[in-house]
Amino acid sequence: MGPAVTLSTPESSASLPTSTGVWRFGDFVLDTQRYELRSGGEVIRVEPQVFDVLTQLVSNPDRFVSKEELFDSVWGGRFVTEAALTSRIKAARRALGDDGELQRYIRTVRGRGYQFVGTLIADAPSAPPVPPPSRAAVPDEPPPPRQHIAFCRAADGVRLAYAVAGEGPPLVRAANWMTHLGYDIESPVWKHWVRDLSDKHRFIRYDERGCGLSDWEATDFTFDDWVADLESVVEALGLERFPLLGVSQGGAVAVAYAARHPERVSHLVLSGAYARGRAVRATDDVEKRAAALDLELARVGWGRDDPAFRQVFAAQFQPDGTRADWAAFDQLQRRTTSPENAVRFLEEFGRIDVRDLAREVTCPTLIMHSRDDHRVPVRFGEELASLIPDSRLVALASNNHLLTASEPAWQVFRAELDAFLAV
């Protein structure tokens, strides 16, 4: 069986050539302009990290590339085991019809690294060697916002972690899946949310039970528990009236809270949200199988070193994300919750149904939804807009369920949010 199909765009990595990066050897063409490995005109599907490893080797044919260089260039210096690198080398060899015994294209330099030993075709467009990445050359990002992390107890005694960042009027985000208060401020998945939303507000967020810094060993794990947890955090902070943000399944929690506490919520903002979970809205066998597949992927693959199973979620949540985005999303999945809790979350998400509660929301509501959301199609954002009386829907030009920092839709999201909360 060949490698999984997990491709993204070449512009995502500054360490790879993007203008003349085309190499020919044997029957193969390695093309970083189109982010393709081809043989005889056919595209050979490889995972992004496998493609990056192969590119680093082929672009430096005159020397071996050390393991440290590969860790830096492909994983951005994050800690990974040598087994991860070994598996990518095996996959690269398999894509080239090579193996550890033949070593026709990739030679192992024992204990040091690997070297590309194929013959590059002379008339191929040339490309400059790729130097080892220099951290000094990476532009400095603004430092993450300072945040204060504290803890409170839910009604049933479960410990909940919450964080406050920034100054100004409060903005509360209902908890959603896969957050970690300590890690989010540096994770590419969430750091722009924390940085930008705390710029003008006292941005308040918390890890839901079973996730992040909150208790993972929670006996009760229902939708009503999630709404009660939001109530507990609001009470712990002594908030009286505030705008409430709900992202993804956190949107349903925010809808329920706003309906039950109209005196507290001044504005409701929903992003990639839905009123019905996948199991509730599945109307045919195809949709039912898709909902069941979510659970099976979590059961089988969440705790494995091989990211292939978890990358299915990355492909749904951020299909237009860069290779770095996908790697960060994979890291986020593993750090934020256990395989057992991942299954519990998905089971409960599937049962969500807040259609009746949505009709009871009385505050102004802004619904933003990616036009080509692969995880939650925009029609479910439209359904929310039809249910909530005083609501407005903004369709964002994006394929991503979770907006990335670099896409134009994120700036539209910020502008719409600021304008809405200023009224």
Image (spheres, rainbow, N blue to C red):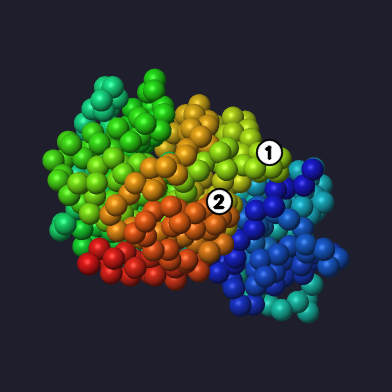
Q: Which residue is found at the position 28% from the left and 69% from the top?
A: 419
Q: CA distance from mark 1 to mark 2?
A: 15 Å
Q: Which residue is found at the position 66% from the left and 66% from the top?
A: 35
Q: Is residue 148 left or right of residue 298?
A: left
Q: Nearer the viewer, residue 332 or 95?
A: 332
Q: Which residue is found at the position 34% from the left and 59% from the top?
A: 390
The image shows residue 288, relative to residue 222, as above or below, that is below
Which amino acid type is shown beneath numbered disc 1? Arg
Numbered label attached to residue 192: none
Q: Residue 271, located in which quarter of the rendered image?
A: bottom left
Q: Nearer the viewer, residue 252 or 209?
A: 252
Earlier in the chain: of badge 1 and badge 2, it is: 1
Q: Which residue is mark 1?
A: 289
Give percent across and percent down for residue 417. 31, 64
Give percent across and percent down for residue 3. 72, 48
Residue 137 seen in the figure: no
Which quadrant does the C terminus fall into? Answer: bottom left
Which amino acid type is shown beneath numbered disc 2? Arg
Give percent across and percent down for residue 234. 21, 40
Q: Which residue is mark 2?
A: 375
The crowd level at tag 2 (other Cα within 10 Å; few <14, some 14-19, many 20+) is many
Q: Nearer the viewer, residue 284 or 227?
A: 284
The image shows residue 226, relative to residue 376, as above or below, that is above
Q: Nearer the viewer, residue 76 or 143?
A: 143
The residue positioned farthest toward the top in the image shown: 219
Residue 36 seen in the figure: yes
What SS does tag 2 mark? loop
What SS does tag 1 mark? helix
The image shows residue 188, relative to residue 213, as above or below, that is below
